Image: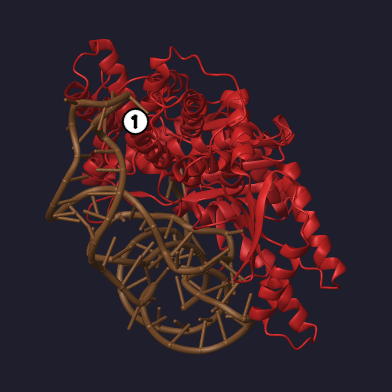
Chain colours: A red, B brown
RNA sequence: GCCCCCGUAGCUCAAUGGACAGAGCGCCUGACUUCGAAUCAGUAGGUUCCGAGUUCGAAUCUCGGCGGGGGCGCCA
């Protein structure tokens, strides 16, 4: 925002340095910290350092101070700037509070829900996330993927990319065959209950694992069932289709509840055959070695690339000719680029698959696909249970998603009941849902992708401190003020009074949102938005406590009302790209 | 053995290579007749795991340790 004014001043500074015959060193501009006013700043250490390296006998620190003083003395500030200061080798350029505050608030209110949206980049970016396996249950480990992936999609979209949100359903593979085997032998004809379908599906899978662990001889039956699937035995295919649909129906409920959506859904089963064709191609090209029947079909990446213990060996087909995850992923990667004209393909997958992902990408490169370098593995750490216990559906150490959400809603409802007992029951339920889901999502997003999250019931549903409900509450309070004036926001006028520290800080934070969006998109880190939303809410809460709006004199009241409306808007926008709703009351 | 990630206040975590390392929780003390106290103000809490190096400047980059976690041929 205010790029024109900023660019003008920045180029002026560069010109002054240039005219003084100083080395050309790009300046890095940041915000001025520790100030009741706001503006932009840059240090001159880099320039001074370059001078010193060029042989000039200067002390970098004192020279930077000198330069900063020289520049600020010569600078012709545009009227939008209040003053320029040289401090400790820094140039601080202060904005004129009145003028900038008006501009910031005006643009927020003009742009509304689009405030912060970046210019269209014209880039097609595919983000694959969620990737659930049918015939298994959703648990909190999957939730991190969903929440992260979905937020990344919304952030990229908001930042200006054209995003294709994709899901990749694990609807076939050994786990499905094991489930079918258990169903056919011990649960033939049963149908899932209408409530808790994923629990039932997951339960049957865990049972299959248990039976097979207890009696390894039964593995033979599973293998022969896999062969029947491979031959597309009609009975197996029909049963598979039926049971797979049960899972898909259950998934849809979860996605709807969490407000998660997809533009395209791929299924493993649809890329299985084409994957095998690619394996044949790899063999004929001499990239893959066919060691069947004794061994599998493998690609020795280290041997091909001349690396050592880096890319290792990728198995692309089982020795019995059945497909693996890799078989299908090869085909899918190609299909994605063929179907959409992708500039970038992002895979949101947990960090344990880092080697595997790099193998797939590298193999694509070896096959001659130039786009391989535009594939990116967005790795995130897993969610553990207390005591470093890994969540595993086969171990039964899972916290089911439906249980988590149900419990969170229950707890949220108790609080709503206590804080706001007069609300209609339906409203209470709606509010509780927004708070519960917001709290869960925020707890997963407000940690960096590389950090392991230890799941804890209380932490996941935390409604105190740095958590979604705090942020939602700030927006709700803003909304309450606006309701008092029937949501009639005064028209834009000059700011006719001196803004205090809280007001300046509030406008400062409002202004930063578009930049935070770009940064979060660039780094693929929703955490940055989560932090920003909290900081903004905190600043707004300060403003709320210290700056009376409705009882102020007219001039003050009018601009403060506009600040309140703008704050509500930006808080809402920032939570919105994290997939968190803001209720009207709570 | 090779590779990746993490290590910051008692706990959970932040911090585009920049000015004084910050929040939340917890502890203690205050503020509701006041636009909603799910709030706010204040107190206390640090050898940023250790050691070198690069740099004008390092929690951040490089190297070497220590501690924890993960990955490495037919699971996904």
User: Circle 1 is placed at which residue position?
Assistant: A473
Q: Quadrant of the C terminus of chain A?
A: top left
- Residue A5, image quadrant: top right
- Taking the image as shown, residue A184 lies to the left or right of residue A366, namely left
Residue A519 relative to residue A252: left or right: right
Is residue A392 something that shows in the picture? Answer: no
B18 left or right of A176?
right
When the figure is inspected, residue A524 is found, relative to residue A437, above or below; the finding is: below
Q: Is residue A476 visible?
A: yes
**In the visual, does A7 lie left or right of B74?**
right
Residue A285 spot, x, y in % from top left: 74, 52
List x then y, in percent, for residue A220: 34, 41
Category of crowding for the residue at label 1, using alpha-carbon neighbours closer than 10 angstroms: few (below 14), some (14–19), many (at least 20): some
**How many circles with numbers are drawn on the protein?**
1
Rendered position, B14 above or below A117: below
Task: Name the residue at 84% across, 71% down.
Answer: A20
Indicate the chain on which mark 1 is placed: A
Which residue occupies 49% across, 42% down? Answer: A529
> Considering depth in this image, is A518 or A305 the residue closer to the camera?
A518
Q: As rendered, which of A100 and A320 lies closer to the eye?
A: A100
How far across and how far down the image is residue B57, in percent?
56, 77
Label 1's element?
helix
């Amino acid at each position: 925002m205010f790029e024109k004014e900023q660019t003008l001043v920045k180029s002026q500074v560069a010109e002054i340095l240039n005219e003084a015959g100083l080395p050309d060193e790009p300046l890095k501009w940041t915000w001025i910290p520790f100030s009741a006013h706001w503006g932009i700043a840059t240090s001159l250490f880099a320039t001074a350092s370059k001078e010193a390296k060029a042989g000039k006998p200067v002390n970098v620190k004192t020279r930077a101070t000198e330069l900063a003083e020289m520049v600020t003395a010569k600078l012709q500030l545009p009227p939008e700037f209040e003053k320029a200061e040289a401090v400790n080798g820094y140039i601080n350029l202060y904005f004129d509070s009145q003028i900038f505050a008006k501009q910031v608030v005006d643009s927020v209110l003009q742009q509304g829900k689009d405030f912060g949206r970046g210019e269209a980049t014209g880039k097609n970016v595919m983000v694959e996330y969620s990737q659930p396996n049918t015939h298994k249950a959703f648990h909190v480990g999957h939730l991190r993927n969903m929440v992260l992936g979905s937020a990344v999609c919304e952030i990229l979209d908001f930042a200006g990319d054209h995003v294709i949100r994709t899901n990749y359903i694990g609807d076939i593979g050994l786990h499905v065959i094991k489930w079918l085997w258990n169903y056919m032998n011990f649960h033939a004809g049963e149908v899932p209950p209408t409530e808790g379908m994923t629990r039932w599906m997951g339960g049957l899978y865990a049972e299959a694992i248990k039976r097979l662990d207890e009696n390894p001889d039964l593995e033979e039956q599973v293998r022969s069932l896999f062969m029947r699937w491979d031959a597309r035995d009609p009975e197996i295919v029909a049963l598979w289709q039926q049971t797979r649909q049960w899972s898909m129906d259950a998934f849809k409920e979860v996605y709807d509840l969490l407000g998660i959506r997809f533009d395209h859904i791929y299924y493993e089963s649809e890329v299985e055959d084409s994957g095998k064709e690619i394996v044949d191609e790899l063999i004929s090209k001499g990239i893959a070695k066919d060691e069947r029947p004794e061994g599998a079909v493998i690609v020795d990446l280290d041997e091909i690339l001349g690396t050592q213990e880096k890319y290792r060996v990728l198995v692309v087909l089982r020795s019995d000719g059945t497909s693996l995850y890799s078989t299908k992923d090869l085909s899918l990667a190609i299909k994605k680029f063929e179907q959409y004209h992708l500039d970038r393909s992002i895979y949101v997958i947990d960090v344990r698959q880092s080697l595997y992902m790099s193998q797939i990408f590298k193999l694509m490169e070896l096959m001659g696909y130039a786009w391989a370098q535009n594939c990116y593995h967005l790795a995130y750490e897993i969610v553990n249970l207390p005591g470093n216990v890994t969540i595993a559906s086969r171990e039964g150490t899972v916290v089911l998603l439906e249980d988590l959400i149900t419990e969170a809603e229950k707890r949220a409802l108790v609080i709503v009941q206590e804080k706001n007992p007069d609300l209609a029951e339906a409203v209470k339920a709606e509010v509780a849902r927004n708070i519960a889901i917001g709290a869960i999502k925020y707890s997963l997003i407000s940690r960096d992708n590389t950090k392991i999250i230890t799941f804890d019931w209380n932490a996941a549903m935390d409604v105190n401190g740095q958590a979604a409900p705090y942020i939602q509450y700030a927006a709700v309070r803003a909304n309450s003020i606006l309701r008092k004036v029937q949501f009639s926001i005064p028209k834009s006028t000059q700011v006719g009074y001196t803004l205090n520290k809280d007001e300046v800080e509030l406008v400062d934070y409002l202004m930063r949102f578009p930049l935070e969006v770009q940064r979060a998109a660039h780094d693929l880190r929703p955490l940055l938005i989560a932090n920003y939303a909290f900081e903004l809410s905190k600043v707004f809460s300060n403003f709320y406590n210290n700056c009376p709006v409705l009882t102020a004199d007219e001039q003050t009241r009018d601009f403060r009302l506009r600040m309140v409306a703008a704050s509500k808007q930006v808080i809402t926008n920032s939570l919105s790209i994290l997939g968190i709703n803001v209720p009207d009351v709570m």
